[in-house]
Amino acid sequence: MRLSRYFLPILKENPKEAEIVSHRLMLRAGMIRQQSAGIYSWLPLGLRVLNKIQRIVEEEQHRAGAVQLLMPTVQSADLWRESGRYEAYGKEMLRITDRHERDMLFGPTNEEMITDIFRSSVRSYKDLPLNLYHIQWKFRDEVRPRFGVMRGREFLMKDAYSFDLDQEKAVESYNRMFVAYLRTYRRMGLTAIPMRAETGPIGGDLSHEFIVLAETGESAVYCHSDFLEKDIPGNDVDFDGDLSAIVADWTSNYAATEDVVDMAEFEASVPEDKRISARGIEVGQTFYFGTKYSEPMGATVTGPDGKDVPVHMGSYGVGVSRLLGAIIEASHDENGIIWPASVAPFHVGLVNLKPGDALTDPVCEDLYAKMEAAGIEVLYDDTDQRAGAKFAAMDVIGLPYQVIAGPRGLKDGLLEVKDRKTGEKEMLSAEATLNKLTAALTV
RNA sequence: CGGGGCAUAGCGCAGCCUGGUAGCGCAUCUGGUUUGGGACCAGAGGGUCGCAAGUUCGAAUCUUGCUGCCCCGACCA
């Protein structure tokens, strides 16, 4: 992408409404624009990252056996009356009346709807286990939206719903999502710690919140420091096999949020030098809630014994849009964002320091074409700005690599290749630059 | 929903107390000089001062009401 033809409104100054670093940097890097409290437009650069995060979530859901569909944002109130949640949900639910005076709502979550889909089509235990998910915009009319996309009213969420014949099988489904989550967050450069959690209005017995440690996190958390060193299940993990050992390993050490923490238990079970008392961002939550929805809504299957039984369900959320904030909170410096390559909006920023110059233009154009051909996503700064402005902008948007093409280096045929994360710079020929980046960015 | 604060050009702000032609920096446009870490000179454009009522000869400024936004708390992906 040529910067001269892109839409990237970078801000030099900090907008005053943004207090925390991820919100500031997202605004400054031209990724989002606030339209209303907790409601954002996603500008091109932000959308690219959102799509990459979404893709990773989809890949890991698929790997774990979940099947994607898409449910609507607007739902009928009748469905929610069946479960009793229309009255119970409270003011966070945005209620809408259509032209025929029918009660509608903008979905804050989809348990009722997925249960409706399930009950209309699935009859036999032989069709289980089933895990259906979608990635859709949700609306929760939060009392106090804040921190940019970290607590928006409109937000993008992945929500999966599992259906099983009994509790034992449901726990297996739960474990699949649990392991998928460990992998999903790690692929974005995050370490998310599963913590004991309250189940809230979703309800249920078994639940974990996946928490990324960050100073700006909204809740206080207490956990064992070994979580930060644990290995993540690899690509070869067998989702058809028994995952209980992995889950047991990841839940053996103490970890809880402030809502449910038992300080006595925390101190008794974690040696003093291993205790982490910090703040965290919730990036996902898993629930097993049994027949809470299937029973009132009549979602039953016929079991092997010929009797109809309500299915055991679980739901599994990932805050997709919130993850942008969490990733930036976890990875930035005083100059701007530092994107992990897996979610970076572009891999490389190619900076032509002197557009129109006989030395820099042909080198940049050639390198740009070759990198694109090699599958490297390049943001090519071909604009006529001063070097300082270009460098500052590149640092703010935080692409993994910057390639600087200026007359000074090119006198000797050399480009400067800078690693955004380490700050290391080296002078390389165009060919060596291409080789290095191809090797670094194609796995 | 309780407490606090803000609203003046795209962004950041001054002006308000003490009413009298709406300003500054950055950004934008034109011309020129520059060019390796957010340049310089000269010029230009851009505002119903959040909205509405009131007081007044006259309101960005004083009064009242409303709306929007931000921060702290209680709730949540």
Image (cartoon, rainbow, N blue to C red):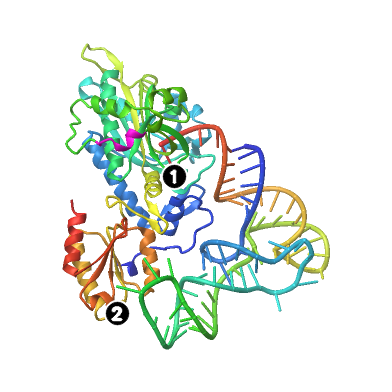
**Residue occupying image coordinates x 38% and y 53%:** A332
Which residue occupies the foreground of this view, A68 or A32?
A32
Q: Residue at x 22, y 33 (%)?
A: A65
Q: Give the number of the disc on residue A260.
A: none
Indicate yes or no whether the magenta region holds residue A231. Answer: yes
Q: Identify the secondary structure beneath mark 1.
A: helix
Chain at tag 2: A
Query: Magenta part of the protein: which range?
Result: A225-232
Asked if badge 1 and badge 2 are on a common chain, one would say: yes
Across and down, in percent, residue A241 comes to 18, 27
Residue hosting label 1 = A150
Real-space Cα distance between discs 1 and 2?
A: 42 Å
Q: Quadrant of the N terminus of chain A?
A: bottom left
Please indicate, yes or no, whether residue A121 appears anywhere in the rendered image.
no
Is residue A320 visible to the viewer in this orientation of the structure? Answer: yes
The residue carrying mark 2 is: A356
Position above or below: A138 against B63: above
Q: Position of residue A56 (x, y in %)?
A: 27, 44
Q: Type of residue at label 1?
A: Met
